[in-house]
Amino acid sequence: MSEIIASPSTRRLARDNDVDIDALAKRLGRTTIGPEDITGSAPAPSGGGGDTSYWDVDHSQYGPVTEEPMSRFAQVASKNLAAAQALIPAVTHHDRADVSAIEAFRKALKPEAQSRGVKLTALAFHVAALARSLRAFPRFNASLTSDGETLVLKDYVHIGIAVDTPHGLMVPVIRDADTKGLWQIGAEIADLAARAQARKIGPDEMGGASMTITNLGGIGGTAFTPIVNPPEVAILGITRTETVTVWDGDTPRPVPMVPLDLSYDHRVINGADAARFLTHYAKLIGDPRNMMV
């Protein structure tokens, strides 16, 4: 058998557990051995996921450095994200939606928005469209049990809104979004975002989402791959609206389009379902009358 490939930390783990790494490789019929082969189980996800001992580097030997401790909130988020990335076979489907009608509708509603004291952002339309899409595609409104054997289908629609705050990413939730109109959704988005920034969101306002929206449209970008937020099975990413040339026969027409990025757990959702879901979602976004209650 050829030389066995194993990291120094894996070899140290084998020595500590009195395991003959060459004999183990021969028994497994492999030339590469990892720590899970020594312990008999997958390594527990940590801040970086699995064995990170090879990250232990004295960076100061290469030049000046400073250290900044991670907040407790950030440490918890780090572990959750690492576990999600390590354990969920995620795929991202990309599409885009015409927002010209939404922008015209928002402009027409501006006087009423001012009188109501509600800022009707494009995100309110996305929440409404996602809520309706989850009702139309119930497999997306589900969670997989930890053993991966049972799919829990939910008869409610709660939408998580990822909020970037100075103390880390927070995801407050709009409850029963499918039963609410645009004005109520817009008011709740503003309230939750403001209280998230002030760290005044309670634990009962941050759990149990059917699906999460992470919106980078106000910052920039053309596409990204959001990490699924377990126990949800999908997450919707939004980036900055761009003007795209659409052809009507031989006539070019500039159309504002919003890029959409749908990451999903491939154990539950297949590519065709994801494409149908996002196509349905884009049609809802294309006509704001679809979001009126």
Image: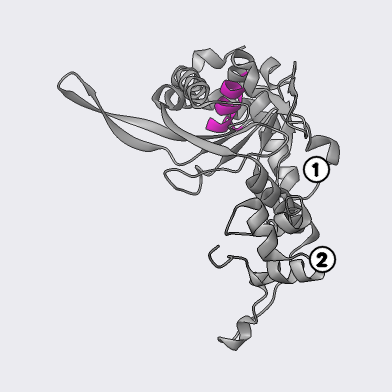
- Is residue 128 located in the magenta-colored stretch of the structure? yes
Foreground tag (1 vs 2): 2
Please say if 203 is above or below 13.
Answer: above
Type of secondary structure dominating the magenta stretch? helix
Quadrant in which the C terminus is drawn = top right
Q: How is the image coloured?
A: one colour
Residue 133 relative to residue 154: left or right: left
Residue at 42 percent of width and 30 percent of height: 96
Amino acid on which disc 2 is placed: Asn
Amino acid type at mark 1: Ile
The magenta segment is 119-131
Q: Residue under circle 1?
A: 201
Q: How many marks?
A: 2
From the image, tell me which residue sits under label 2: 17
In the image, residue 163 lies at what x, y percent?
Answer: 66, 44
Which residue is at the front of the view, 191 or 208?
A: 208
Along the horizontal axis of the image, is 235 left or right of 180? left
